[in-house]
Image: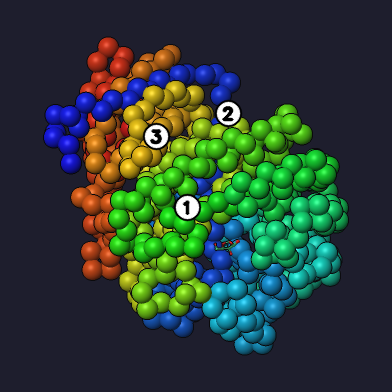
């Protein structure tokens, strides 16, 4: 550890500039993902109507309240890899007559299909969030897919709307976001980009919202991390009239083979994880460059519909369930990744953190009737202010966070403006050094500032069922504003969100 005086010398410089024609940061960047995986749906969201745990139509009330408070703009379901095994008709009608499904990707468990289309879409209504349905391409058919759309969206008389009404739902839900398969390069069918592009064209041709209003938002299964060939082929081969979004999946970990514990990690593992997390900036930039070539007007969105930290499962839990704890390391991943998305809001217009409850970088963990909010939840809640706000361009000069012979940019920033308020979100990923950040505000007439911080004593700190509020946002006062320059001292591994008026 360096002496305090030396630590205080670390400085970064930021400018935030007012810009009249700046893009809007789509609220959909702050989306979530709920797969039939481990304890995300069953024994997570869904405990069943007869559970002693207070619930609404079988979904835990404490989870509903927490997600409403978080303001989640969209929720992706039912997968993931599970999506390409899912046959939606098995999940409608009387629950005691539904067939079972064996979850072939995640633990081989037998599910009773008691959580199906009505359960999910009714939940989205309760949460006031937009559903994002990932439909089965890998083991489904065009007909099955288009009938699902008719079932949930058709307002007139049709075979599928009649079936929906028979199942006690008169009005359609009006689902806009549709994923055409998932990870077609892997669990979705091990396809080549060329093959998938053709298949996508076929599926998209028959996708209609059944009212000719053109309201569907069709998302192609996208690249795995830096597979730029995949994006190139999709953008080149699919007519833009059939395409609204191209997905991208990228997870953060120490190494894919040796992910390590979610809580018992050392600094080298922290550094490696942050290296993969910060790679998002390069991924988004390069995939965008390819998309710009074929779509200079940026009609097609880059949809990062799976991102987050991925570690070994908690000891004693099913390896197929992907249950992990969530520490300050995850807060760092969330803060830096969301800054990247905000700064690329002209192309990145939708994203989904994986996953919402009890799986991977969850915002909520449950154990019996207990529930806790993770540090990632608190970061996303602080960043909520950026949803549908005007993106403000930023420049950044930052010291490096050094480890061994390697280094990473220590500070990350994004800024936005909404309803007369300016918000600046800053992250310092350095594990030891505090960093004083001087923020120059150009064309912004701000006088009063308040701020919140998320930090803790150790990187490995987390919220537990014994101490669920160990890490929560606190008021932050370590900043001063003089002659148009805001000077903020960021503690090691901290996330700070400033509000200026
Ligand atoms: O989120 C877990 C899994 O990761 C998803 O099912 C899949 O799409 C990805 O490989």
Query: 192 and 110: which one is in front?
Result: 192
Q: Name the residue tied to disc 3.
A: 409
N-terminal label among 3 and 1? 1
Q: Which residue is mark 2?
A: 23
User: Quadrant of residue 443 in the image?
Assistant: top left
Q: Quadrant of ligand 1?
A: bottom right
Circle 3: element type: strand
Q: Earlier in the sequence, mark 1 or mark 2?
A: 2
Q: Position of residue 89 (x, y in %)?
A: 73, 75
Residue holding disc 1: 252
Q: Give me the C-alpha separation between circle 3 and circle 2.
A: 25 Å
Residue 499: x and y, percent? 34, 31
Q: On the rendered image, what quadrant is the C terminus found in?
A: top left
Q: CA distance from mark 3 to mark 1?
A: 16 Å
Q: Earlier in the sequence, mark 3 or mark 2?
A: 2
Q: Tell me whether circle 3 and circle 1 mark residues in contact (CB < 8 Å).
A: no
- Could you say which is closer to the camera, residue 172 or residue 411? 411
Above or below: residue 62 compared with residue 474: below
Whole-number angstrom distance, CA of label 1 to CA of label 2 = 28 Å
Residue 361 visible in the displayed image? yes
Tell me the residue at 45%/24% (across/down): 394
User: In the image, is 417 to the left or to the right of 480?
Assistant: right
Asked if ligand 1 lies within 8 A of label 2, the reply is no
Number of residues whose C-alpha sits closer than 10 Å to that of mark 3, classed few (under 14), some (14–19) or many (20 or more): some
């Amino acid at each position: 550890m360096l002496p305090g005086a030396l630590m205080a010398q670390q400085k970064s410089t930021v400018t935030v500039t007012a810009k009249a024609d700046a893009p809007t940061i789509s609220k959909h960047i702050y989306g979530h993902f709920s797969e039939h995986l481990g304890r995300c749906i069953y024994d997570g969201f869904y405990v069943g109507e007869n559970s002693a745990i207070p619930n609404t139509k079988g979904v835990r009330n404490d989870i509903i309240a927490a997600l409403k408070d978080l303001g989640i703009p969209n929720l992706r379901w039912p997968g993931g890899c599970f999506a390409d095994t899912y046959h939606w008709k098995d999940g409608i009608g009387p629950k005691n007559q539904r067939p079972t499904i064996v979850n072939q990707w995640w633990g081989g468990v037998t599910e009773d299909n008691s959580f199906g289309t009505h359960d999910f879409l009714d939940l989205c209504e309760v949460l006031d969030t937009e559903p994002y349905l990932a439909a089965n391409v890998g083991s489904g058919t065009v007909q099955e897919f288009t009938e699902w759309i008719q079932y949930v969206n058709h307002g007139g008389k049709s075979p599928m709307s009649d079936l929906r009404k028979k199942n006690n739902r008169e009005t359609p839900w009006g689902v806009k976001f549709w994923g055409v398969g998932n990870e077609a390069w892997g669990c979705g069918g091990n396809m080549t980009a060329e093959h998938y592009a053709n298949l996508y064209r076929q599926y998209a041709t028959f996708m209609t919202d059944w009212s000719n209003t053109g309201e569907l938002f069709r998302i192609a299964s996208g690249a795995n991390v830096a597979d730029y060939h995949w994006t190139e082929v999709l953008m080149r081969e699919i007519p833009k009239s059939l395409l609204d979004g191209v997905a991208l999946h990228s997870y953060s970990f120490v190494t894919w083979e040796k992910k390590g514990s979610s809580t018992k990690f050392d600094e080298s593992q922290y550094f490696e994880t942050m290296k993969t997390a910060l790679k998002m900036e390069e991924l988004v930039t390069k995939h965008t460059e390819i998309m710009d070539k074929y779509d200079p007007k940026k009609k097609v969105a880059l949809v990062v519909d799976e991102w987050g930290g991925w570690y070994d499962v908690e000891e004693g839990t099913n390896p197929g369930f992907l249950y992990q704890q969530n520490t300050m390391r995850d807060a760092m991943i969330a803060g830096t990744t969301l800054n990247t998305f905000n700064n690329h809001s002209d192309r990145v217009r939708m994203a989904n953190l994986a996953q919402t409850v009890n799986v991977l970088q969850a915002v909520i963990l449950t154990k019996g009737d207990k529930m806790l909010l993770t540090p990632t939840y608190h970061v996303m809640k602080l960043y909520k202010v950026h949803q549908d706000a005007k993106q403000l361009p930023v420049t950044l000069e930052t010291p490096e966070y050094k480890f061994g012979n390697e280094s990473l940019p220590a500070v990350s920033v994004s800024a936005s403006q909404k309803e007369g308020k300016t918000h600046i979100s800053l992250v310092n990923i350095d594990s030891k050094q505090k960093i004083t950040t001087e923020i120059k505000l150009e064309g912004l007439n701000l006088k009063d500032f308040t701020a919140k911080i998320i930090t803790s004593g150790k990187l490995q700190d987390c919220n537990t069922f014994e101490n669920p509020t160990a890490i929560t946002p606190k008021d932050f006062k370590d900043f001063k504003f003089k002659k148009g320059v805001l000077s903020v001292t960021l503690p090691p591994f901290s996330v700070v969100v400033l509000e200026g008026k």
